[in-house]
Image (cartoon, coloured by chain):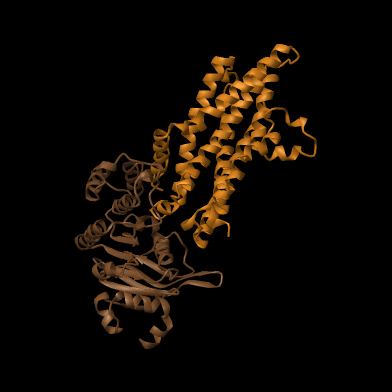
Chain colours: A brown, B orange
Amino acid sequence: MDNQSILEVKGLTKIYGTAKAVDAISFSVRAGEIVGLLGPNGAGKTTTINMILGVLEPSGGSVEIFRNELKRNRGNIMERVNFAAIYAHVPGNQSVWENLYIFGLLYGVDNLKEKISMLLKEFSLEEFADTKAGILSSGEQTRVALAKAMINTPKLLLLDEPTASLDPSTALLTRDKIRKYAAHEQAAILWTSHNMHEVEVVCDRVLFLSHGRILLEGNPKTLTREYKKKNLEELFITIAREPLSLEITS
Amino acid sequence: MKLKRVYAIFLRQMFLLRRNKTRFANIFLWITLDVVLWGFVTKYFSSTGTVHVDLVSTLLGAIILWDFLIRVQQGVMVAFFEDVWSQNFLNLFASPLSVKEYVSGLVLTSIVTSTVGLLFMLVFAGIAFGYNVFVLGTYLFFFLLTLFLFGLALGIFTTGVVLRLGPASEWFAWPIPFLLGPFAGVFYPVSTLPALLRPISKLLPPSYTFEGMRTLLTAGTPDISSLLMGVVLAVFYVLLAYFFFVRIYRLVLRNGLITRFSAESMSG
């Protein structure tokens, strides 16, 4: 594990019955780095993220965050980790402000009210502060989820398709915001997306997952040349359709 | 354990109560109906002159204490259901929150809502039907403690069951106190039950409370060791329910159900 490494995953495995959802994957994410976790549906991306969050017990392997084993120090570690996922909106029966306040307490945030004001402004949510989160549009709810993900200024941020329900303009602003955040806070970010253009723009490095295994890893800007593909999307489609042939040709 | 996180779980429930006043119905509506119904039943039987015990203290008093137990159970359960209904488990358990802090938050919520409910019932029954809880004297502490602890145990146990079987099993959680009621000696002495069923009552802490209360009101002094037995048994059930919940929590972490907690996902 190098000194800059914030997340270190070693031989991480999840088996359901006889099916291997994640098959002994190993990777790390360094401070200030944005790593894209790519792969077709069912490749094991969300399972991997859930194991890193500690809400799914691995069948094997280990997760180290800030050089601490997750299963031994989860409470302390998670105070500096956060996540946003398209399938995990904040409770719709509370206002945006109430949600941020509750999660701020859970994450042990100091100067919480000031932090909430800042986030509401940052994510253009000020006018919705007293609105129930559940009646917001899906794009607005995604912004609330992102604001919640930033509430504790995490040093490790896990984003599962964070821009999937945002319009192109807001998605662009959000990508820019997260890139700046990673650079400014030296935060490690693990990002899943099916938008290959987004991945090329945002990620410093990508990991291609298929059938629970990492098939290839590298810089999204150079991988396409290495594998003689026109762009990342073509590479993605190749892996999704013929993961084994790609393994052999590589 | 960090108290701030326990407070967060409690505060979420207070925000929900403030935001939607219909939630107050669960605290006040049913207990009001119960006090009214049983208050008049008591009044009617008293007026016939065929009953020679203080029915307001024995029957209405028992109903109020039994309702307190139900409020305690539902205080835990409804707070948990709010997270089920809003599919909030992933957000909660991906945070630094531990299962101990979460359960403590549910318990704190239950303490506040059930205490408010109890005080309301006592004042209302006092004004409407002349009920005076203070006739129970210092024994009231034992009675309330036993019922409170057993209510918590039922609340934690039922949430564990729903966590394991999924939201569709919610139907199982609501009637549990009503299933236990016939054996708890709320409405009649345990000796009324057939001999075959009496051992079930011995396993239920509320039976010690209600038997003790009747003895206090009719004969004078209840058996202290019996009251203590009720408390000890209730503590045992709280611990058992907590370990059950933790075990279920570990199981749903292992099989991944906590990350996709919905009725559909649990059906297999």
Residue A182 image point, x, y percent: 23, 62
Residue B155 sits in quarter: top right
**Quadrant location of the C terminus of chain B?**
bottom right
The residue under the point 53% across, 28% down is B29
Say if residue A8 shows up in the picture.
Answer: yes
Say if residue B219 shows up in the picture.
Answer: no
Q: Residue most toward the bottom? A: A249
Residue B224 image point, x, y percent: 64, 30
Residue A192 image point, x, y percent: 34, 66
* Above or below, comparing residue A51 to residue B88 in the picture: below
Residue B152 sits in quarter: top right
In-front residue for pair A226/B57: A226
In-front residue for pair B170/B238: B170
The residue under the point 74% across, 16% down is B51
In-front residue for pair B66/A96: A96
Drawn side of residue B91 relative to residue B67, left or right: left
Q: Residue most toward the right? A: B195
Give the total number of marks visible in the rendering.
Answer: 0
Residue B139 image point, x, y percent: 59, 25
Residue B251 sits in quarter: bottom right
* Above or below, comparing residue B212 to residue B134 in the picture: below
The residue under the point 25% across, 58% down is A174
* Above or below, comparing residue B225 to residue B255 in the picture: above
The residue under the point 43% across, 49% down is B88
